[in-house]
Image (cartoon, rainbow, N blue to C red):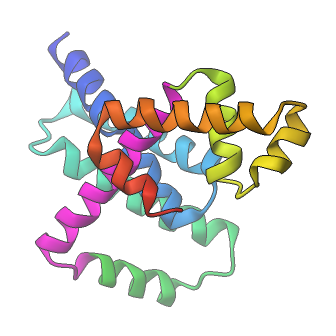
């Protein structure tokens, strides 16, 4: 029962950052999520048989390797390019690793905050910021006034700002 709680905690803390990590390696959201879920399942299965000292590291390595396998199976990657990519990842410093992990955590937190917006507000916000649509284009597509779109974007920023100043500064970098 204790292992199940540990897996649950690991899942809550690292699922989104692992998905983003996988997404950067394979550029396919559905496959990235599948790979991460498979790696959690493998961790849970392996943990029944033996002690895993650092499950977080295990997950990142398992996801990375699974992404390389996925790329090898679905594209024109050669073994040489995969080995070179692996050497580059293994060769990064602990500072660079920590920075990449922090960035992935920030991205995960931003998406969590965006997911917490009311549905209509989230949709408008994503159309504007993710899809690069103008307020007029959004208003036309959603059959709303431009003032309503402006109000929803303002509401989204206010809610995100309330969640964390880090998210706000991160989001401003996209404008």
Q: Is 100 placed above or below 47 here?
A: below
Write down the region rendered in magenta: 90-116
Quarter-wise, where is residue 163 in the image?
top left
How far from the left and from the top, in percent, is residue 166? 28, 48
Please give the name of the residue rendered at 52% of the width and 57% of the height, measured from the top-left corner. 23
Count of all numbered marks drawn on residues in the image? 0
**Magenta part, dominant SS:** helix
Q: Quadrant of the N terminus?
A: top left
Quarter-wise, where is residue 61 in the image?
bottom left
Which residue ends up furthest to the front in the rendered image?
147
* 121 with respect to 45 (left or right): right
Please give the name of the residue rendered at 19% of the width and 42% of the height, measured from the top-left corner. 55
* 40 with respect to 79 (left or right): left
Q: Is residue 11 visible?
A: no
Please give the name of the residue rendered at 53% of the width and 30% of the height, measured from the top-left corner. 155
* 84 with respect to 1 (left or right): right
- Asked whether 173 falls inside the magenta stretch, the response is no
Q: Is residue 25 visible?
A: yes
Please give the name of the residue rendered at 27% of the width and 34% of the height, measured from the top-left corner. 13
Considering depth in this image, is 91 or 47 the residue closer to the camera? 91
Q: Is 159 placed above or below 33 here?
A: above
How far from the left and from the top, in percent, is residue 126? 64, 43
Q: Is 151 placed above or below 98 here?
A: above
How far from the left and from the top, in percent, is residue 130? 64, 53
- Asked whether 100 falls inside the magenta stretch, the response is yes
How far from the left and from the top, in percent, is residue 168? 37, 47
Q: Is 85 placed above or below 62 here?
A: below
Quarter-wise, where is residue 104 in the image?
bottom left
Considering depth in this image, is 114 or 100 the residue closer to the camera? 114
């Amino acid at each position: 029962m204790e292992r199940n709680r540990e897996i649950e905690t690991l899942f809550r803390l690292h699922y989104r950052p692992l998905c983003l990590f996988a997404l950067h390696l394979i550029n396919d959201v559905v496959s990235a999520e599948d790979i991460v879920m498979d790696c959690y399942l493998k961790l849970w299965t392996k943990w029944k048989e033996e002690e895993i000292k650092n499950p977080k590291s295990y997950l990142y390595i398992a996801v990375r390797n699974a992404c390389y396998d996925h790329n090898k199976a679905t594209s024109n990657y050669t073994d040489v390019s995969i080995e070179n990519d692996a050497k580059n990842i293994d060769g990064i410093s602990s500072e660079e690793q920590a920075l990449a992990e922090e960035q992935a955590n920030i991205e995960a937190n931003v998406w969590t905050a965006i997911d917490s917006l009311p549905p209509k507000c989230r949709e408008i916000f994503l159309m504007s910021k993710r899809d690069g649509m103008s307020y007029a284009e959004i208003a036309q597509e959603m059959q709303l006034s431009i003032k309503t779109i402006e109000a929803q974007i303002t509401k989204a920023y206010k809610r995100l700002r309330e969640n964390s100043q880090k998210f706000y500064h991160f989001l401003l970098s996209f404008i």
